[in-house]
Image (spheres, coloured by chain):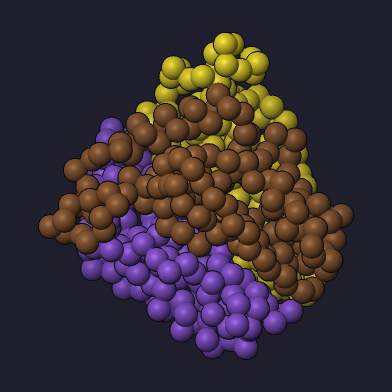
Chain colours: A yellow, B purple, C brown
Amino acid sequence: MKVFSTTFTLPTEERTEIADITKQVREALQQFPVQTGIALINTMHTTCALFINEFQAALIDDLKGLIERLVPERGPYKHDDPRYSDCERGNANAHLRAALLGRNIAVGVKDGELTLGRFQSIIFAELDGPRKREISVQVLGE
Amino acid sequence: MKVFSTTFTLPTEERTEIADITKQVREALQQFPVQTGIALINTMHTTCALFINEFQAALIDDLKGLIERLVPERGPYKHDDPRYSDCERGNANAHLRAALLGRNIAVGVKDGELTLGRFQSIIFAELDGPRKREISVQVLGE
Amino acid sequence: MKVFSTTFTLPTEERTEIADITKQVREALQQFPVQTGIALINTMHTTCALFINEFQAALIDDLKGLIERLVPERGPYKHDDPRYSDCERGNANAHLRAALLGRNIAVGVKDGELTLGRFQSIIFAELDGPRKREISVQVLGE
């Protein structure tokens, strides 16, 4: 068994932007001579998230609604208060939303393909854009 | 090191049903000649979840209460609105609850056994049942 | 490829205590002759959590505020009610908070180092302390 890794860059345009990155992950996987194993997908950042779900426009709007309801844009957040923090982005909500959604995914690889279910997409959530984000794809297998 | 994988099917009977699947995962693991490594457990679906916690009846009721409170059965969800979606199941809440709970688990394997703590169970949450669900178990090790 | 594992102990002093354990995980990793691979970090417990985010004091306070708001200390929790449970710790909130935050992390290893982004720390959340907690670090690689 061997380990392979690569990264790709994802430029985002909105503050909150949710994208299906299954295709990019598939392309990364195809660079590697792996038939059977696992793929780990990570972001290198603390204000975005990665998870697996159905990628359907209406559902994505519902998901945005949920994270806005659970973690409002403007809470009384210390991280956004110059008395407690020198972060000037006012992005406490992005950190907290990322903590709820998670940021790393492990997916099986079989016959050289990701073993995703019919409705499963690998979804990236930009929570403090626009930014340039780096996604890491590691594959362990043979 | 080698990689092994299998799947098992879990029929569910209720809309929301939370089950301890540690035994099924242990049985899957025992099919493989692995003493040391990791086990990855995944669902192939977007409206159920997998996580590790104590499996105790009262706590499971509390967990159901929590996800119902954070993600109500009927929100004004676009995914459930025929103007925005052709999904007729009205299951936006199940997708959103799955996004909060997570769906993939990595557990160590040592001496051929899952390295779970004393109170840790592998827990499956059906969020849009009854359905027939497929769980994948992959083991990397030697 | 080989698999290595170790554990370390973390004594906690507060009921809710959030700590940066990146250094301890790095030290565990350095014991192993691995240049390329993945590291899996797990807790063996059901009332604490592990996740990756920025470790900044004000943000940690915001995170505590969030979990207290989403999962209040005293709900009408069955797990805390002697009619339904023989758990005497009154710690339903800790289990539920752990379920939201997650408890296992996979991080890449490259050139013998964790591939964390500039602001990423591995964060441990004690949710029902003070206790002595065990953290497991497994590394698969070569």
Instruction: Tell me: B43 left or right of A131.
Output: left
Quarter in which the C terminus of chain A is drawn: bottom right
Query: Residue at left 54%, top 50%?
Result: C11
Q: Is residue C138 above or below residue C91?
A: below
- Residue toward you, A80 or B131: A80
Instruction: Tell me: A80 left or right of B78.
Output: right
Query: Residue at left 73%, top 58%?
Result: C28
Instruction: Tell me: C21 left or right of C44.
Output: right
Image x and y of residue A35, in percent: 72, 73
Image x and y of residue C94, in percent: 37, 47
Image x and y of residue C89, in percent: 29, 52
Q: Is residue B86 above or below residue B110?
A: above
Give the tally of numbered discs. Answer: 0
Query: Residue at left 62%, top 41%?
Result: C20
Q: Can the viewer see residue C104?
A: yes
Q: Can the viewer see residue B122?
A: no
| Residue farthest along the left direction in this orientation | C83
Q: Is residue C74 above or below residue B12?
A: above
Quarter in which the N terminus of chain A is drawn: bottom right
Image x and y of residue C105, in percent: 60, 54
Quadrant of the rendered structure where residue B127 is?
Answer: bottom left
- Residue toward you, C51 or A46: C51
- Residue toward you, A27 or B56: B56
Instruction: Tell me: A65 left or right of C72.
Output: right
| Residue farthest along the top direction in this orientation | A83
Query: Residue at left 57%, top 11%?
Result: A83
- Residue toward you, A62 or A135: A135
